[in-house]
Each structure stands twice: as C-alpha cells, then as structure tokens.
Image (spheres, grey):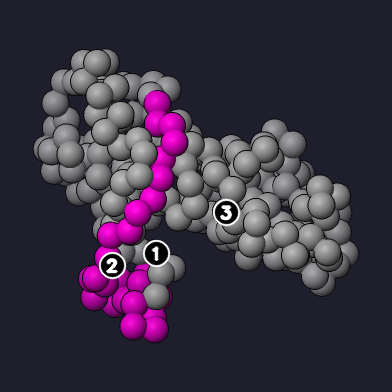
Amino acid sequence: MAAQIVLVDKPYRWTSFQVVKWVRKHFQTPKAGHAGTLDPLATGLILVGIEEGLKSLSYLQGLPKEYYAWVRLGYRTLSDDAEFPPQPVSPPPKLSATQREELLKSFIGKIMQVPPSFSALKVQGERAYRLARKGIVPKLSPRIVEIYELEEVAYWAEGLWMLRVWCGKGTYIRSLARDLGEKIGCGGYLAALRRTRIGDYHVREAWQPDAHLAR
C-alpha cells in the first residue's frame, strides 16, 4: 500500500485537484485520486492514491488528522477563515492560561458542530459554497464530530491563538475556530491552517511540489 500512496505537502492556494494533477504528471500516471480535500488557503498533508492505491482511498479518508490552527479572536468572517475580510466583533477578554485550558477541554470528545456556510456539502443538490457566494445562507444541520486532542501551542495578547488539533473524520477546523470565538463571546475565525498528519503518515515525509514543478 505505502508504495502506491503519495504524500504531498500542499502549497498555499493550491486546490486539492491541483495536487492530484501534479501527482499524475510527476509520476506519469492517469490513475490518481486524493483521500480527502484541504482548503486552498490551508497547507499541508494530502494523501494521493495512484494505480492500485486508489482502492485504499476510503480507508485513508477515515483516518484521524492532526492540524495546527491559528485562530484570530475578536473578529468574524463570512467563510470562517481568511478568504473574506475580517469584521470586528469585540476585543477578546483577558483569559488566563487556566481559563483557556478549560475552554479547550470543553471541545474535546464527541461534539455537535455546524459546518461552515462555505463548504462543499450539498444543500438540495447544490454545493453550500455556491449558494453562499450567491448571498443565500445555506441551512446546514449540526452533526457529530470527534476531537481527540486539543491543546494550546501559543497565545498572543493580540488575540491570536495557535492550537494543535487531533480529530476524526468530518471535523471542520473553521467551525472550531468560529465556535471558540462564539463561546468566548468575541467572535473568532481561522486565520491559517496546516495539516501535519493523517493516521501514521506525516508531512515531513511528503513531496514538496514547488521544488519539482519544473521536472
């Protein structure tokens, strides 16, 4: 299996489809597909199956994932990430390390989460993000997701919070950032995101497309 699974460190603003296209060209195979998308504004690990590895995609999609997320408190955006300009809500309160730790603990385990309006989920046959871009706010139902680990990496007084997230399939980190801000009462959005691990696969073992585009 491992020889037919390509690990790619997705560059900023690349789509998941561009990653697959690069793999097809670089490995000279028409048979390639990814095991789960990553938003264009995010960077990090994408698993691409080639040839017989395509049979493993459904299994790979179900593996837990690790992210490093930068959450900006005090603002909201239409997409819950940095695609749209941040709108100020209120200055984040001064939270002690203990208060922040307790807040993060409240999101660990199986939780109900509403996906972002700008997501690929379908609403009455149409992608939610397409409706959102038309100014129609799609009604997305909350669903159960699981967060196994959620810990603070760094916190800056300006309201920028760096977190490490280890979570199950279907978890939206954009929604997590939004919900953290809402629970604090000041708003929040995902300023940056990097996926570092999927199951036992790590981004440090991944191909760097930027270094090989000319080949």
Residues packed near mark 2 inside 10 Å, few (<14), some (14 to 19) or many (20 plus): some
Q: Can you give x and y, in whole percent of width and height, for residue 145 in the image? A: 39, 50
Q: Can you give x and y, in whole percent of width and height, for residue 171 in the image? A: 42, 50
Residue at the outermost front position: 110
Residues packed near mark 3 inside 10 Å, few (<14), some (14 to 19) or many (20 plus): some
Q: Mark 2 sits on what residue? A: 140
| Side of 8 where 43 appears, left or right | left
Considering only order in the chain, which callout, 2 or 3, is on the residue closer to the N terminus?
3
Residue type indicated by callout 3:
Gly
State which quadrant residue 176 falls in.
top left
Residue type indicated by callout 2:
Leu
In the image, which disc is placed on residue 62? 3
**Magenta stretch bounds:** 123-151
Q: Mark 1 sits on what residue? A: 119
Considering only order in the chain, which callout, 3 or 1, is on the residue closer to the N terminus?
3
Distance between the alpha carbons at the discs numbered 1 and 3:
19 Å
Q: Quadrant of the C terminus?
A: bottom right
Vertical relation: 49 (above or below) 195: below
Label 2 with label 1: CB-CB less than 8 Å: yes
